[in-house]
Amino acid sequence: MNDKVKDKLNEAGLAVPEILFPDTDLRKWSCIACDQYTGRPDYWEEVESLVGDAPSSLALMMPEAWLGDEKRKSHEDEIPKKMVSYLSDDILKKLPEGFMYIKRQTSTGERKGLLALIDLDRYEYAPGNKALCRATEGTVEERLPVRIEIRKKALFEMPHVMVLYSDKDHILCSCLDKETKEQKPLYDFDLMMNSGNIKGWHITGEDALEKVADLMLRLKETAEDGMLYAVGDGNHSLAAAKRCGDRYALVELVNVYDPALVFEPIHRLKKDGEVVDYIHGREECLRFGSRPGYEAVIMPDYPKDRLFKDVIEKGVLPKKTFSMGQADDKRFYIECCMRRSE
């Protein structure tokens, strides 16, 4: 990739990754984001059973459901060792420099995304900042140490971060659809636990990379208050990466106007008047809230077209204002990338 394209991408707060791609059974490799099903240890037990001894992203991340569990320490200690072995055993193989264009079938339709490196020098999570990429909710400092500790020991990263951009005319994905129309996807498989299908196209051509850069710069020109990106999912992971001194982080860029991207309210589960959990899904919250001593608090919808405007005006939104889809629609780990400090 020539310097001209790199400079354009840099102006848009992006860089092109060299993806580490798993050469193994992708259905066992690909697991849901670590911050899902935090109150459902049975979900993660089923995932463990499905994976067995096969290489899996489960071995490379810490499900939050395990943070208070006795298995946390042993699992945390194994993560760096697994990373070394997956690299040395060629389970993860480096692809040529390129983006990954993703189409994920969810409960609300086909969601499209672009896997890219985001420049952490252009990201801030302090309320009221004027960065190109901004957090949408407050960052809880107490949630960072575990992530920082794991990341410091990690050779590479896997993204569950979804960063939103505002593209009412869908110019980016329309371009990528044309670029990949005659191209066979690198992968196409059904995710575990009935979580839908996912396809990915590796975008490597210099002309295509420059088109992405040019389109993101067009969107930047019209971005209100200089805000091109809003962190939808995984803000604490980005904050941990920044605190670790990394320059870039691998994220999935998703258009906030993607028809399949649905904002769902996050409901509250109370016990003795105090919030004890945040639940994705109205029926699940009502079920938990029906137990003695518990109360389900059902929250109102949050219109997604208000997101950028509200963050610009208010700095950050209240904790757990919305979720991008139901739990099963969240990002699954597939691709990895070596950490980059420059």
Image (spheres, rainbow, N blue to C red):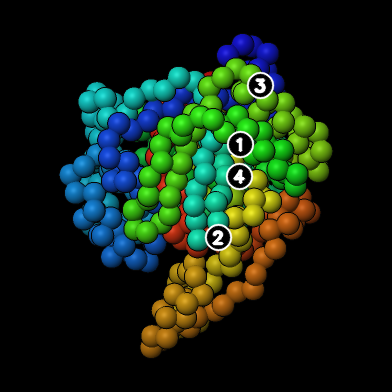
Q: Secondary structure at mark 4?
A: strand
Q: Nearer the viewer, residue 160 or 124?
A: 160
Q: Nearer the viewer, mark 4 or mark 2?
A: 2
Q: Are marks 1 and 2 in contact (CB under 8 Å)?
A: no
Q: Secondary structure at mark 1?
A: helix
At 54% from the left edge and 30% from the top edge, which residue is drawn? Answer: 182
Q: Is residue 122 visible?
A: no
Type of the residue with mark 4: Val
Q: Upstream in the sequence, badge 1 or badge 4?
A: 1
Percent x, y of residue 10: 66, 23
Q: Are marks 1 and 4 in contact (CB under 8 Å)?
A: no
Q: Nearer the viewer, mark 1 or mark 2?
A: 1
From this view, report whether residue 288 is shown above or below residue 62.
below
Q: Tell me the crowding category of disc 1: few under 14, some 14 to 19, or many 20 or more residues within 10 angstroms, Cα based.
A: few
Q: Upstream in the sequence, badge 3 or badge 2?
A: 2
Q: Nearer the viewer, residue 292 or 12?
A: 12
Q: What residue sits right under mark 1 in the picture?
A: 177
From this view, report whether residue 326 is shown above or below residue 240.
below
- The circle on residue 254 is 4
Mark 1 to mark 2: distance in Å? Answer: 20 Å
Farthest front residue?
182
Type of the residue with mark 2: Thr
Mark 3 to mark 2: distance in Å? Answer: 31 Å
Q: What residue sits right under mark 3 in the picture?
A: 210
Q: Nearer the viewer, residue 6 or 79?
A: 6
At 54% from the left edge and 72% from the top edge, which residue is drawn? Answer: 267
Q: Quadrant of residue 132?
A: top right
Q: Quadrant of residue 303?
A: bottom right
